[in-house]
Amino acid sequence: MLSDLGFEIHLVTITDKIGYEFSGRLFNLGKYKNATNGIFNKLKRFRRFKKYLHEQEIDVVLDFRMRRNALKEFLIQRYLYPGFKVVFMVRSANFGYYFPEPDVVAKQLFKDAELCVLTEAMKQNIERRFGFEKIKVLPNAIELSAYERNYPEPNDVTHPYILASGRLQRGVKQFDKLIETYAKSELPKLGIDLYILGQGEMLSGLRQLAKDLNISDKVVFKGFINYPEPYVTHALFSVLCSAFEGFPRVILESLACGTPVISTDCPTGPRELLDGTNGILVPHQDFEALKEAMNCLAQEEHTRNRFKAAARASIRKFDVAQIAPQWQGYLNALYND
C-alpha cells in the first residue's frame, strides 16, 4: 500500500524468516544472528542497523517490534533512534507486548513518543492507562478488489464446515475453547465440520482434545495455507473467540470473501467490524452465547444469506482506497513536522 503511494519502503527483519510476499527493499538482520546470539553478536547487529538507517537516509521508522525489555528499549531509543522520526506501532490489545512493565517505566520510555494503533478503543485504553497523547488511529486495510472472483470449492471438502484461522499458540486465539464449544453445539450432529487453518505448538494438544471429545473426525486441521480464500469463501461462516486481538484480519478477509462471521467481543476489533448486518457479536468469553450463535447461524440459511449479501459493503470503509490517503497524510505530516 505505501509503495503504491510513492514511498520508498525498506523492510528490516530481526529474524531470518520471510513468510509472506512484500514490496520494498529487504534488510535481513536475522542473517547476521549466530547460534549463540551473545552480547557481542547483538551489538554487531545493532551497529549494522544503525549504519543502515544513516546510509539510506531513512525519514520515518515504523517500529513493529514487541518491546518487553525496558533496558533494551532504553538503549534503542538512546543510541539507535536519535535523529530519526519514529512511530511505535501497537498491533494488539495486549499492551504487554509493546510496553515494558511496570507501567511507570513504560510511561517514562514512551512519554513523548509517536504511537499508532488500530482502533479508537485501543487509543482510549492507552490514554487511560499510560497518559500518552500522541496516538494516531489507522486500522488495517484490505484490497477488496482482490477478492472479486469466484473461488472454486477446495477438492478435499466433503461436508459443510465452519472455519477458524490463526496461529495455534496458547492464550490468544483460544482454539481449545472453540473446539469444546463446537463439541457442545448442534453442529457435529448436523454434519457440519470445524476447519482450523494454521500451525503452532498447540497442534498436537488440540488434536488430542478433539479425540477426547469424540469429534476427531469432525475437526479438520488444515495447517498453514498460503491462499486460504477458497476455504474462507465456501465456509458457512467464520468464527473467532480470541482472548484479545487488535484489528483481526481474519474477520476482514472473511467478510471480503462474502462469508459471515461470529465473534466474541474481545478487545479490540470485532466490535468495529461486526455491525449486525454481517455477522453476530457475542459477549467476550461467553462460550454459551457463542454456542447458541453457532447453532442459530448454522441452521438459519436465510440469516446467513442476509449476512453474506451485506458482508463486502460493510467493510468498504476499510478498503485500501479509503485507508491509503490517511496513511499518506499521516506520514507526510510527520516528515514535514
Image: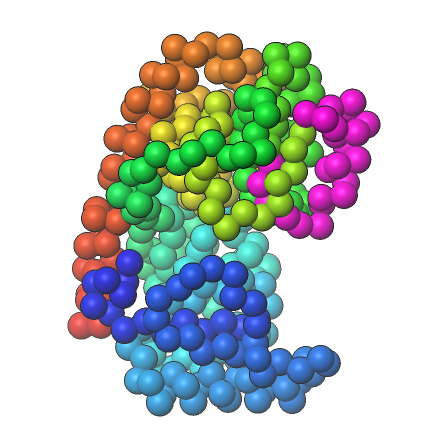
Residue 264 visible in the current orientation: no
Vertical relation: 169 (above or below) 296: below
107 left or right of 214?
left
198 in magenta: yes
| Frontmost residue, 305 versus 71 | 305
Vertical relation: 334 (above or below) 269: below
Identify which residue is drawn at 62% across, 80% down: 33
Tell me residue 35's x, y (percent): 71, 80
The C terminus, quarter of image: bottom left
| Frontmost residue, 177 versus 111 | 177
| Frontmost residue, 82 versus 152 | 152
Residue 8 visible in the current orientation: yes
Identify which residue is drawn at 39% across, 10% down: 302
Magenta residues, start to end:
196-218
Tell me residue 168's x, y (percent): 64, 45
Tell me residue 197's x, y (percent): 58, 41
| Frontmost residue, 226 versus 38 | 226
